[in-house]
Image (tube, grey):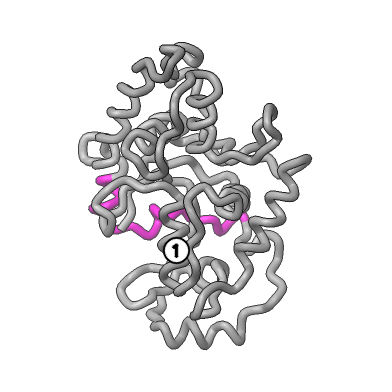
Amino acid sequence: MKPVGAAWVLAALAAFGAHAQERGIPLDRLRSGSAFLSRDLLEMQQDDLANPAMLWAENGAKLWREPAGRRGRSCASCHQDAETSMRGVAARYPRIDPASGKLLDLEARINRCRTEHMGAAPLRHESNELLSLAVHVARQSRGLPIEVAIDGPARAHFDAGRAYYYERHGQMNLSCAHCHEASWDKRLYSEAITQGQPNAYPAYRLEWQTLGSLQRRLRACLSGVRAEMLPYGSQRYVDLELFLAWRAQGLPVEAPGVRR
């Protein structure tokens, strides 16, 4: 990796083309964030006994079976064993909800099930309960390739997400692509610049000392470039999640991941 500093990143703005290709990184060069981990952190992610995110996954398995809401239903009441019924589900999200026509990420899908089918209140974003259920579901797709649909009603969301990805944000006037396409495999001070792939989320980040969603990571990026952080659940985040998932097509789901 070639070391760079903040001044280099800002200088790269002038050299970065205004019109990026639809897929900025060729398929044969896709690299998960785990490719940039130290050996110790990679081993921590791969060992379920060492991966701290497994505490949330175990709690999610418990919540999956617990009745909730006025109808007294649990997730298992409809979906039975998650290891079977949820296999491959997370790899296909975000996706259009056929009932509402809205684009939902996995957390929003869980909350919609709670409110519509269980008669329960939606879970708060970044709450232990929502993260636990999300990582329990996502874990069932580990090793399967990400494969999202961007046709039909999803196309407008995909286009909006792509536009947001290449749009400049904040006081530093940077887009997501300036770091994760133009500068990946370099370093910003002591940190590796990755391709910004979403396939490990929900993930345990050492800097957070807890599990967090992909939207939390997106908000952290916006904070890093001194841009306005949208509220959790914003449609712009979900649109961006769809674009990121399409951009990562073919990479295996790694949730729950471990990141610095």
Residue 92 in picture, x, y percent from top left: 59, 36
Residue 229 in picture, x, y percent from top left: 48, 63
Which residue type carries mark 1? Thr
Residue at x 33%, y 78% (from the top left corner): 189
Quarter of the image for the N terminus: give it. bottom left
Taking 228 as reference, is 57 left or right? Answer: left
Taking 33 as reference, is 251 left or right? Answer: right
Residue at x 53%, y 19% (from the top left corner): 117
Q: Does the magenta stretch include residue 28?
A: yes
Q: Is residue 60 magenta?
A: no
Which is nearer the eye, 182 or 7? 7
Choose top left, top right, bottom left or bottom right for residue 259. bottom left
**Mark 1 secondary-structure assignment:** loop
Q: Is residue 81 visible?
A: no
Choose top left, top right, bottom left or bottom right for residue 33. bottom left
* 80 is higher (above) or lower (below) than 32: above
Residue 70 in picture, x, y percent from top left: 43, 16
Residue 32 in picture, x, y percent from top left: 46, 53
Q: Which residue lies furthest to the right in this view?
A: 152
Q: Magenta stretch: dominant SS?
A: helix
Q: What stretch is highlighted in magenta?
A: 27-44
Q: Which residue carries the number 1 mark?
A: 194
Quarter of the image for the C terminus: give it. bottom left
Which is nearer the eye, 171 or 28? 171
* 174 is higher (above) or lower (below) than 66: below
Q: Can residue 82 be seen in this view?
A: yes
